[in-house]
Image (cartoon, coloured by chain):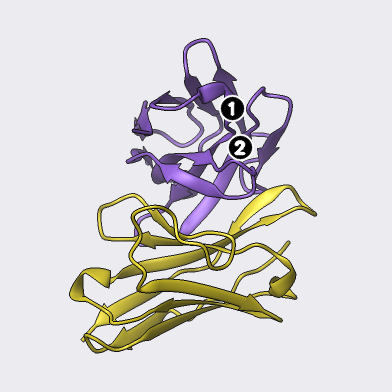
Amino acid sequence: SYVLTQPPSVSVAPGKTARITCGGDNIGSESVHWFQQKPGQAPLLVIHFDGDRPSGIPERFSGSNSGNTATLTISGVEPGDEADYYCQVWDSSTDQYVFGSGTGVTVL
Amino acid sequence: EVQLVESGGGLVKPGGSLRLSCAASGFTFSEHGINWVRQAPGKGLEWVSGVSSGSKFIYYGDSVKGRFTISRDNARNLVFLQMNSLRVDDTAVYYCARDGPTNDFIDYWGQGTLVTVSS
C-alpha cells in the first residue's frame, strides 16, 4: 500500500516560515491534501489539490507538490498555528484514503 | 453549515460489537460519499471505511476488513458503522468525514465519538 512519510516535528519562531514535507513514491502525480488538527479538535482542511486554499483559510497557508515530495508552507507563523498537520492522498490502486503520520508544529 | 454528528461510542469488551451513527445536515447528503476515520489515543489518523453517495461503492481499510460494515440511509441522512469482533487496538476516537466533490479528499469532519475496547 502507498506510504506517506512526514517528519514527526517542526519548530519555528513566530513570524518565520514553517515547511512541512510529505514524502511518497512519485507523489507529484497525485493530488495531496493537508489537514490541521489542534488538541481536542477534529481535523480541518487547510490545503486541497496540492496548493488550493478552502474558503476561510488564511493566505499564509500554501502548498506545492513535485517529484517525491509535497510541501505545506506556513508563512508568518502565528502561535495559533501550533498543531499537528497531516497530508492525505487517495490511493486508487487500493481504493483507500492514506494519511501521513503527522507532523507536530511547535511555535517557539 | 455542514454538520456531521457522531454517536454510539462507548466502552465494550474485546470480542464485542458496537454500532456508530453519523447524522448529517447542512448539505445535500445524497451527493456526497461519507467516511469513517479513527484516531487512537496520542496517534495519527487512520482511514477506516467509506461509502459512495448512492452506496454503490464501499471500501474498507485492511485492519477492519471482515469485521466492520458501513452503510447509509439517504432518506434519513444517516451513516452507520457496525463494528464486530472488536479488539483492544480498535480503541480510538471515530470521526465521520465527508468526501469533497471529486470523491478523492475529505472536506468536513465531525467532532468524533470515543470507542474504548477493554476488559
* Amino acid residing under circle 1: Glu
Q: Which chain is purple?
A: B
* Residue drawn at 46 percent across, 37 percent down: B14
Query: Which one is earlier in the sequence, the residue at label 2 or at label 1?
Result: 1
Nearer the observer: mark 2 or 1; the answer is 1
Indicate left or right for A11 with B65 as reference. Answer: left
- Residue B50, disc: 2
Rendered shade, chain A: yellow
- Name the residue rendered at 55%, 29% in the picture: B84
Q: Identify the residue shown where x is 24% and y is 89%.
A: A13
Q: For residue B56, which quarter of the picture?
A: top right
A79 above or below B31? below
Subunit ID for the residue under disc 2: B
Q: Secondary structure at mark 2?
A: strand
> What's the residue at 71%, 81% (across, down)?
A67
Query: Residue B31 bears which disc, if any?
Result: 1
Query: Is A42 left or right of B53, judged from the image as shown?
Result: left
Q: Position of residue B107 (x, y in %)?
A: 48, 46
Residue found at the very far top of the displayed protein: B75
Whole-number angstrom distance, CA of label 2 to CA of label 1: 14 Å
Q: Position of residue B83 (x, y in %)?
A: 53, 30
Q: Amino acid at mark 2?
A: Gly
Disc 1 secondary structure class: helix
Q: Is residue B85 above or below residue B111?
A: above
> Which sits in the foreground, B84 or A56?
A56
